[in-house]
Image (cartoon, rainbow, N blue to C red):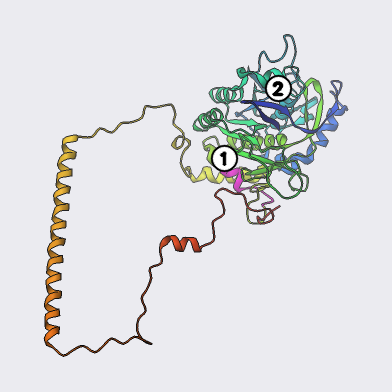
Amino acid sequence: MVVLSRRARLAVPGLALAGITVLTGAAAQGPGSEAAQVRAAEQPQLQAIEAPAAWRLSQGRGVTVAVLDTGVDTTAADLAGSVTSGPDYTLGADPPGYQPPHLHGTFIASLIAGHGSGPGDDDGIIGVAPAARVLSVRVILDDQEPGLSVYNSSPRYANAINDGIRYATQHGAQVINMSLGTGDATRGMQAALGYAVSHGVLVVASAGNSGHPGPGYTPYSYPAAFTGVISVAAVDQAGQRASFSDRNSSVELSAPGVSIIGAGPGGSYLQASGTSPASAFVAGVAALIRSAYPRLSPAQVAQALISSARRRPAGGYSPSTGFGEVDAVAALHTAGRLAAAGRATGLAARGHFATAPRPVQVTHRDPARIAVLAGVAAAGAAGVIIALVVLALLTARTVRDRRGLAAVGPAAPPAQHGAGTLAAMRNVGLIELLESADPDRPAGAEPEPGTETGP
């Protein structure tokens, strides 16, 4: 994941792939080379999410996944012919003539849609959705780029990510992956996400790399924590939360994120840990679903992903791993059942987000009609008051008559005070009842460490 922190009012990018390692160089191409070894080495991470078995049902053909990142090396053998490059919203940050490395973006794209290389594409990296296409939109910089400080400080780049979301939506992306995050929930980003969701785009984002071992919660990361975005945490080979992975109630799913192997620029291969690759894996499974069942809405695709998760935590949910680890085969089967049902559940995206800004509707009122109705209401109220007054007078007269009858009869016995008489009751006010109750826990507070179930 690329983590964005706050400096002044601008989002600041910083590459946060934990433990990134270059495994091979440009010479690692061809039969019997390291590329062949890479294919064997990546099998455990693919099998962990059942990707090879899912390819019998779907390989992502016909689906475009937008990778909003540091850019993708279109010459990488494992991605050749599958990548379309969109605009670069960071132009001008780096010095003239500098060629960006496209390190993080190439790595992420290969995990989503790598198709392999070499004879029969049997070598190199194969992604979760090897038949899908990638739309690369450069919205951030790799950490080692010389223009990082310019990007950080210039208002020119404040809306780079938001513009990238809108561009991807307008240019055919069915899935958007953002292995990046910021601690600031900006309205511009929220509006851009609303635009994407309202146009049928599924958005996946990494939960964040600010975690630490043991209990405790991490701050929210955006866009992952925005409504409508699938927030993905990272787990290790045993399905346990990776120590660096964020832990909070925004987490919905988890996927492998420790020692993940992927393609890099210039024919290199990389091994890295982070919630970045975890998000890429979920985006790849989403592409498989959208290819096999294109009529499903983003909400239904999310439902298929979440409800079919494996390694579901005790109690069904945990802020560490969400509803469990993504399972490509189970998700496809669940999506098939949803498609067979023939109708969407819940509100459509356009029920939450307007298709375009609209003027506020004004309701016009008839002053004459309002005056007549007000007069009728006043007359009715006056009639009720008169009736109450008459009733009160009749009641008082009846009481006086009864007192007169009692005066000519036998004297009443003196009142007895003691056991058996009713004591006066004091009304207990609502405020007193509220004050006697235990004070509520502050709204929105996370549970105390150790009180929630699950890992």
Determine which of the numbered discs, if any, sits on residue 301 in the image: 1
For disc 1, the neighbor class at 10 Å (few under 14, some 14 to 19, many from 20) is many
Q: Image point 74% across, 31% down: which residue?
A: 16
Q: Let me know if residue 222 appears in the view.
A: yes
Spatial distance from mark 1 to mark 2, Cα to Cα? 31 Å
Q: Image point 72% across, 24% down: which residue?
A: 79
Q: Nearer the viewer, residue 30 or 407?
A: 407
Q: Earlier in the sequence, mark 1 or mark 2?
A: 2
The x and y percentages for residue 370 are 19, 39
Q: Nearer the viewer, residue 278 or 217?
A: 217
Which residue is identified by label 2?
A: 141
User: On the image, which quarter does residue 49 sit in?
Assistant: top right
The x and y percentages for residue 371 are 16, 39
Residue 304 is one of the magenta-drawn residues? yes
Which numbered mark, 1 or 2, is in the foreground of this view? 2
Kind of residue at badge 2: Leu
Magenta span:
301-312
